[in-house]
Amino acid sequence: MTGPFDGGRDGGRRDPDEPDGVRGIPRIPGQRAAADDLEPPAADVLRRALEGAARAAQAARESREREEPDEPDESDQRDEQHDDAGTADEATAPKPDGITGEAAWAVTDGVTGDTAPGTPRGPAHPPDPAEEPHMRAPAPEPAGPPPSHSVLKSLLGAWALAACSPEETTHVEDHLTECAPCADEALKLRDAVGLLQADRNLDLPPLLRSRVLENCLDRRAARIPVPMWATPYDAETARLDALLRDIGDAEWHAPLQLKWFEKEERTTRRATVAGVIGHLMTVDGLVASALGLDDPLGASAPHSPTDRTEAFWRSGHSPPTRTIHEPWRDQSHTLIRTVSFAGRGVAELSVSYGEFALPLRDALIDRAFECWIHGWDIANAVVYPYPAPSGPHLHAMINLATQLIPSTLAARRRAGLASPAQQLVVPGSPGRSLHLEVEGAGGGDWYIALDSPAAVGSAERSVAQVALDDVEFCQLVAGHISPDEAAAGQDGDRDAIRDVLFAAASLSRL
């Protein structure tokens, strides 16, 4: 027979030399080895058990001392006499090796005292910790049975934040050594607390709104989607709105320089952040009027963007403040909502700019470009990060500028600001061209007709080549850098290169 009666030592095997008379008789377990004879791991287990008994004895003694009355009764006097009588025996009792201080007194008292063997009991005169510097104070042992698994699991968050009491902390840490799922969750919570305490920039990324909307629309498409040709305007107004929400009241009066190019010179105009937002709102009113919406300047307002801006700045009795933010934001939302509900035919609706007109699809790309450029001006004035638009939106802005360069070049030629045409061709036929190579996420290759706006750009008729970065080309079109300052790779006809670069800079305006 195997099992608890024979100590499990035979493991079901029988000794062939065992007499038949003693076969099957339960064996008495052999004598346990002393602590000194145990292997190091077993000795460590016994040592920890003895230290735990000492801590329990200390806790029990402190509990009795709190419950005892101030005046000792007869039973206390008898206990003290008994303790004094046992002190001599305890002093001469051998202590287990490796156990020092209070732990050893607790063990010997459990063996020689009146209590049952194995019951820890505190010494009458515990050793002074100052006499044994190597002895450390034991960790507090939790009183009472440990809480249930659900209670300990609910304490993991507080434990990760170091908000538990000492007793709760001991219970939780003891539980983590036994429960793998709770230990894994506790590790994750502790890592999360480390992330919460890390220093990080509180400024929201400018593209956060667009990324959130893009993720939401990927999961659930809008019932009334924004047309593709209106998405650059939607994205740039959202980015500028995020910037304006993040600046303080005083920064709305921060000064900045508006720059554009007229004829052969750069022109500047001082303004404030609030003044620039008013400028954007008044020029957006041209698109609102074309859609049949209310014009912020009224029905009799001029159509020239420059005249509209000057009229708005003159009409105010005081400099504009951040109160201009909400009207501009509401107007931009109304424009996007209107073109989304209007359908496909609205894309070709004409928007008048006074001296010229653009289809609505191109007008909104133009408004997106100006919103980005002036948002960049504002960000530089208030020291705010403001990256360039996304590659597809930047490409659409550059493509519109290249379409407007031939007509602008013809107007400059009529004003005597450009070299005369050399080879006139039938409208719609390939003519002398310049190869514009724009590098970057929004770049590409364009062939710009040089002699007539009605001609078609052609790679076979290319007489010159210019290479520019996408953002640098947009700065040239916005009038922020002059044609002479543009770091361009040039090859071919010098007059053609100069004419195209100056025509690109002449697209800028207030």
Image (tube, helix red, strand yellow):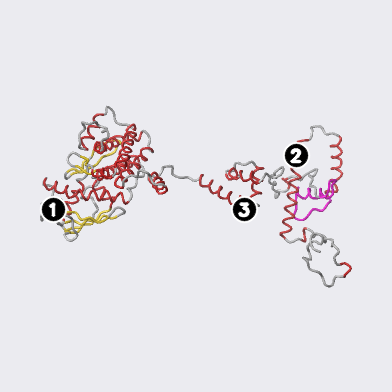
The answer to whether residue 99 is above or below residue 167 is below
Asked if marks 3 and 1 touch (Cβ < 8 Å), the reply is no
Residue ID for mark 2:
63
Cα distance between the residues tagged 3 and 1: 80 Å
Q: Nearer the viewer, mark 2 or mark 1?
A: 1
Q: Residue 405 location in percent, x, y?
A: 19, 49
Residue extending farthest bottom: 17
The answer to whether the residues at label 2 and label 3 have Cβ atoms under 8 Å apart is no
Looking at the picture, tell me which residue is in the foreground, 132 or 166.
Answer: 166
Amino acid type at image mark 2: Ser
- Which quadrant of the rendered structure holds the N terminus? bottom right
User: Which of pointers 2 and 3 lies earlier in the amino acid sequence?
Assistant: 2
Residue 190 in picture, x, y percent from top left:
56, 48
Disc 1 target residue: 427
- The residue depicted at 62 percent of the width and 53 percent of the height is 180
Horizontal relation, residue 15 to residue 172: left or right: right
Based on the picture, tell me whether residue 487 belongs to the magenta stretch: no
| Residue 128 vs residue 433, the one in the foreground | 433
Q: Which mark is residue 180?
A: 3
- Residue range in magenta is 92-117
Secondary structure state at the residue bearing disc 2: helix
Q: Residue at x 22, y 40 (%)?
A: 351
